[in-house]
Amino acid sequence: MDVADLGLPVDVPSTALFTDQYELTMLRAALASGTAERRSVFEVFTRRLPDGRRYGVVGGTGRVLDAVENFRFDTAVLTFLREREIVDEETLDWLAGYRFRGDIWGYPEGEVYFPGSPIMRVEGTFAECVLLETVILSILNHDSAIAAAASRMSAAAGDRPLIEMGARRTHELAAVAASRAAYVGGFATTSDLAAGFRYGIPTVGTSAHAFTLLHDSERDAFRAQVDTLGRGTTLLVDTYDVAEAVRTAVEVAGTELGAVRIDSGDLLLVAHRVRQQLDELGARDTKIVVTSDLDEYAIASLAAAPVDAYGVGTQLVTGSGHPTSSMVYKLVARAESADPKAPLVPVAKKSSGGKTSVGGRKWAARRLDSYGVAEAEVLGTGPVPAALADRQLLVELVKGGEVVAREPLDAARERHTRARAGLPMSATQLSRGEPVLPTEYLHASSGS
Amino acid sequence: MDVADLGLPVDVPSTALFTDQYELTMLRAALASGTAERRSVFEVFTRRLPDGRRYGVVGGTGRVLDAVENFRFDTAVLTFLREREIVDEETLDWLAGYRFRGDIWGYPEGEVYFPGSPIMRVEGTFAECVLLETVILSILNHDSAIAAAASRMSAAAGDRPLIEMGARRTHELAAVAASRAAYVGGFATTSDLAAGFRYGIPTVGTSAHAFTLLHDSERDAFRAQVDTLGRGTTLLVDTYDVAEAVRTAVEVAGTELGAVRIDSGDLLLVAHRVRQQLDELGARDTKIVVTSDLDEYAIASLAAAPVDAYGVGTQLVTGSGHPTSSMVYKLVARAESADPKAPLVPVAKKSSGGKTSVGGRKWAARRLDSYGVAEAEVLGTGPVPAALADRQLLVELVKGGEVVAREPLDAARERHTRARAGLPMSATQLSRGEPVLPTEYLHASSGS
């Protein structure tokens, strides 16, 4: 059947084409030159955090596992590659049988990371690993950017729940992934039904200004909503005059009204006034939800305001100023020959220009101080020091091509809470600063 | 069949769930209150351009048409909505038969826009229109942000081709849409195979640093690439020492070498040196491609450098600092009753807080000065003045639920070139400034 029949927005039949063309031309040339089968190690890392950020958050690991499993070259894709003459017949034959059969290790989803952290390590033949570069980076770069913004917002919100409502501000499928990453970063719910459908994230939503404007009066609109959705619903009170709307809302719904939502104006001021008015009307349990262009700073500025929940849209799905994570996928070691037993040689780009990287297959561990608080991200290419053996960060995700580390999304969410709590307290300061942990390198030659 | 069987990255079976929950709860309440069938007009517009930008570019119109056609509630979706108790049985029945049967007008894709421009106008019953809010905004907000960045970059690049290579920096499907929007905005090619597959955009790509590092020497790598991809290929020359790599490249490929790529360092300086070296080696026709974190400013700064093509990644797919377009979808008019002949009443949010909008169903026209250059974006709710009748911007996209305005992507690309050329010359200044056209409102009551 034709995928288009399903009404999908983009009829790309597998994840295999979420790939930059050069990966296929490199494969073709490597197959021809006899280097394709050299055992290789690629690592995903970032050279820096976004300016001023104190930690990064790994988002998207679970989606990477799905993408690797579904990276298959079917007939439609092979036909496309043949017609465009992107690769030759020998390469097409190789691609037709492609399954990733190597190993992937990585920081588990929700874990925090720092400059240089080997967030993911992909090992296998050059041929099977080089093809995964773009799709792995797309997912980790996007989802980690959202997870990091979500984490800062959830730290700022404290115990108050955060609602993800940014679907309309980003690509319709990026929105679904953003909602997932926001949940990992500490958000409680989403307005995006596709995210609820696909990932089981709790969904919320009641009404917009259009609903009030549709009716002959605000009272009619409120009555229609309460009659249908019940007194526990959230009424939007800023279409006309807020004070009048709050009065009408309580008249219509009674003091059991669930919540009112404020979507414009000086939220600090309006929240105080609305709280006072609700209390005076006896609606002491009616909550206040605010939802107007919030970011982590605006959330923090409302800490002392009588606000019960925050809805966040634009700033969440755009990573609060940093919509991507500058992660790269680099060859760090490869075998001397195609012999599966040939030793690995560390490799790294050497030219000037600031894009150098550290060669060699790395381990990573987080060293704690005497109080149990993280004090350094330690990376190395030699043996792991005994004192760090049980503080290692990389876990096995894919073994011989089989995914071995699926987990519920809540596991990643809880992991993030723990990981952030283990950082020095300055991690959750919103002010711009340096990464809260230094990255230290222990090289094989240091013999430690 | 299960959509997951197809290996799709997100198994959302139609576009109907790219929807915020409140659209369904509003539908439910409106069906119950008898207002769902009121004829309604929603408009998409933005209150402001991103700070400093002089014009916006409409991107994604073609994708909106696909999304509206595929907005269907199938069994899996209805089951989800029932199990989550998001709507009641009456609403589920209504949704099961849902097809958008209204009309959509809009600025054609590639057209430029300004604050207030009614980029899209959706007309039908409240029920059928309210459901489309999120998916329409997701597409237009994302794709227009990318198209606008692409347009600035293509203006800065002049006749030199731009290569879109940002897939790895954004969500894997946002990348496909970004590639499409970049093409509309003036890019020539993309590295993203899925964009080539789905939209027929020309794809390019040869090799990365990993390919050089895989081989025992740079010479081996270059020879492997040239043997397979031919002398016309592009060799990446900044893995070790650029001058040595250029010498090796010409030794291996001869003076017919297609191009060299520089991906790091001071591009202005390096491009001059590499050009001189290539010329001295007799490779006068070998082109220079640069690809390191470029944005429109970096492209402009290389205008006098011997560069033949630019590859742009991160800054393109993140909208060069503005990854979304702040478009909103607002009810601007609705009927007094559910009677299909009832007159329309203009409506608009009134409360303070800066989020007000202009009520009424609008036309839009671009007024030209005596030299034929655009001088104002004129919007109105009454009759169109005769002088502007043939300068109207809105075209019919969907009529009675049928898409009537499909076009090849090249038509949008060419339209953008024409539309930008019709603006005052200051439009393509990169410096921050005001919108290059003022927005003027002619209200019905002004009688013009």
Image (tube, coloured by chain):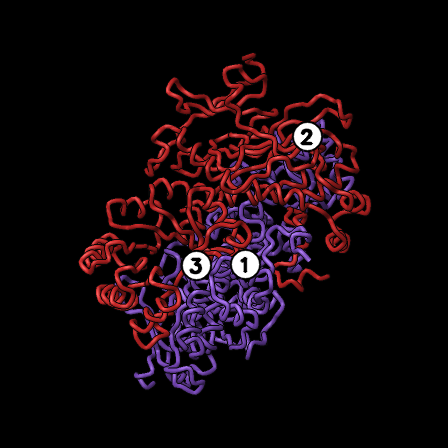
Chain colours: A red, B purple
Instruction: Pick whichever, A181 or B238, lies toward us.
Output: A181
Q: Which residue is mark 2?
A: A40
Residue neighbourhood size for the residue with mark 3, other residues' Cα within 10 Å, grouped as few (<14), some (14–19), many (≥20): many
Instruction: Pick whichever, A361 or A212, lies toward us.
Output: A212
Badges 2 and 3, same chain: no
Disc 1 is placed on an element classified as helix
- Residue B346 at x, y percent in the picture: 35, 78
Asked if the residues shown at circle 1 and circle 2 are in contact, with their CB atoms under 8 angstroms apart, the answer is: no
> Disc 1 marks which amino acid?
Phe
- Residue A44 at x, y percent in the picture: 57, 34
Q: Nearer the viewer, mark 1 or mark 2?
A: 1
Residue B43 appears left or right of B11: left
Q: Which residue is mark 1?
A: B80
Question: Where A436 sits versus B70, above or below?
Answer: above
Chain letter belonging to callout 1: B
Q: Which residue is mark 3?
A: B325
> Disc 2 marks which amino acid?
Ser
Residue neighbourhood size for the residue with mark 2, other residues' Cα within 10 Å, grouped as few (<14), some (14–19), many (≥20): many
Q: Nearer the viewer, mark 1 or mark 3?
A: 1
**Could you tell me which residue is drawn at 59 percent across and 60 percent down?**
B76
**Could you tell me which residue is drawn at 45 percent across and 85 percent down?**
B340
